[in-house]
Amino acid sequence: MKRRISVVALLVLLAACASLRRNGGAGRTPALQQNIVTLSVARGLLEAAADSEDPDLRAQALPILVAASSEDGWLVRGWLDPSRSVQRAIAKSHPEKLSAELLLRPGADPLAVALALVGRGSSGEWLNWKGDGDWLDVLVRAVAGDKAAQVSVLDEVREGMVPAEPLLVEVLVHSDIPGVGLAMAEGARNAEDDMRLPLALGAHHLDAASGRDALIDVLRNADEMTRLFAVEALTREGSTESIAWLRRAAQGESGSVAEHARLGLVALGVVKIDTAVEALSAPDRDQRAWAAACIGMYSRKRPLPRGVVSSLQSTWRDESDTVRHSATHALIVGAGVGAVPVAPITSQTEPNAVSVMVSAKWIEEHLENAP
């Protein structure tokens, strides 16, 4: 049964002052400040999300609850969660807190274990991982430093014989296995369609020359959706080579791919932000969401003008959950959590992706004051 949230008195003054000190007050009004999700309410909402039947909500909430707690209860609960996505979220966010005993527990997701090992940034030779002997079990041993397992992983990657698992390429990129970049470039030509682009992008991240050739091969006859994914990934990578790719796409592609690339160039500070603000009103939902995401990326290195903050706040009322989620994230990154026009929480409030995101950020930014 889902837990309801008991509402305490909102600490409006504390929230407003802290947010204004951190962000200079840009883009805020008293009405918006009164709607800030404060620490006690945010904590209650995250705990409700941790009880949710939705694994995505649990994966959002549990890493923040782990960070806000001095005890291991939330960590163990997240690591024992039956959902692989929850285990992987814990492994990505708190790799150093997972002991050998926890990592070796029966039933642990091997990809989550591999994520924890690469997140530690040190050898895992101490980990005596057995598993069932499938591909991901071999990957764990390879990441832990087993030379024979590394040779086996490289052979499989070159042949494109890799499972279509989320976060697999991230593990390979950060694995420090010698030659993995070249292996992914070769594997991108041999893999099934759903893994060709991820492998090419992973190769591009590690080895620009071989990755460039692999990307050319993958994108030569790719459909529009694959090209859009490529634009988004290259934007987030943000390298000089990525900018060159995006420039070519913005000029040489047509339709939504070219527009996606132009917005990506906004994110990287190459094209004026006005382009993304205009796209917040585009008819296409995905374009609006990507425009908001690009504004958020833009703001990581540059302050957002007041008018841009206001435009994002207006977009928060968009009919699309995807757009609202993207706009909320951009507001949090660019103007602080206090700029998000969150509706007041009542005893009937149920957690959703946006409210959990805002609550998580509020707790994250005020861990020293968290209840």
Image: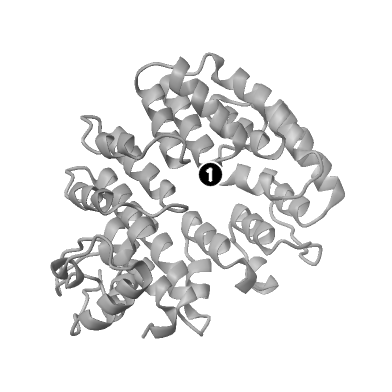
Identify the residue under disc 1: 166
User: Nearest the camera: 190 or 268?
Assistant: 268
Residue 321, position as x, y percentages in the image? 24, 46
Dividing the image into 4 quarters, which one contains the C terminus?
bottom left
Compared with 257, 93 (above or below) is below
Q: Is residue 41 left or right of residue 245?
A: left
Q: Residue at x 31, y 40 (%)?
A: 289
Q: Residue at x 42, y 46 (%)?
A: 298
Residue 1 seen in render:
no
Compared with 200, 277 (above or below) is below
Give the amino acid at mark 1: Pro
Q: Residue at x 56, y 60 (%)?
A: 92
Residue 135, position as x, y percentages in the image? 69, 43
Q: Is residue 109 left or right of residue 207?
A: left
User: Nearest the camera: 278 or 52?
Assistant: 278
Answer few, some or many: residues within 10 Å of disc 1's Cα (few below 14, many 20 plus, some between 14 and 19).
few
- Which residue ends up furthest to the right in the rendered image? 147
Query: Which image quarter: residue 279?
Result: top left
* Visual colour scheme: one colour
